[in-house]
Image (tube, rainbow, N blue to C red):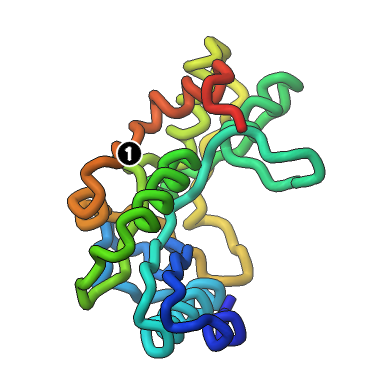
Amino acid sequence: NVPAWLVDALPPTCFLVHLSTDIVYNGRQANAVESQADPICVYGRTKLAGEQYIIQHHPNHIILRSALIYGPAPFLGTSKSSFIQATSNSAQSDKPMGVFTDEYRTPVYMWDIVNTIRALIVRRAEWTMEDRVFNMGGPDRVNRYEMSHLVLQVQQRSSDILQKKLASEITFGYQRPLDVSMDSSRLYALLTEVPFTPISAAVAEVLTGKGKL
């Protein structure tokens, strides 16, 4: 997660867009801003170290702290999926699904990420600001129960399979931030040509096939 070898190999003229994570925040307050990075787990600390290395060694960059990413089903051979696919699969098999009511994110739609990176690259000659770290979250702060409930609502399925749980009552073996929702207003102001999709609209788009790869 610390891409030192890659950064060192880049020529200074190369514009680097680096994806970091919302897990650099400690999860103790909602809608964190960029200056509040304070990771409490190894993953978050490693990602923050990666950001800092890029800042120190490759000035021609933009760092995007991505929220939970969701979108269409991944390509064949890729096992990782988003909450949309996980919820749909549980509903189809009528399998109970435990979902946290106290873990909050600002999920970001995959196509909004694509459009963001494209706009940053197209306009790369314009970026002269000193602070080049931006939150990249969607416009809605939701917990994991609300995410899955929305999927079932769009599919007109019963939410009876959803079992509410509290992450704060579970021992994971590592510290897990509860609320890593982010304030992404700086990025929104920078890229006014990129509309960030409300989660309800994006989920409906994916489930109707309009947002497929």
In this orientation, does residue 16 appear? yes
Q: Position of residue 185 (x, y in %)?
A: 21, 52
Name which residue type carries label 1. Phe
Where residue 119 appears, as percent x and y from the top left, is: 35, 50
At x 47% / y 20%, what residue is drawn? Answer: 204
Looking at this view, is 108 or 42 the one in front? 108
Of residues 151 and 131, the one drawn nearer to the viewer in this rendering: 131
- Residue ID at (35%, 82%): 59
Residue 201 vertical placement versus 55 (above, below): above
Q: Which residue is mark 1?
A: 196
**Residue at the (48%, 50%) spot, across then down:** 68
The C terminus: image quadrant: top right
Q: Compared to 37, does 55 lie above or below?
A: below
Toward the viewer: 126 or 61?
A: 126
SS label for mark 1: loop
Q: Is residue 105 above or below residue 153?
A: below
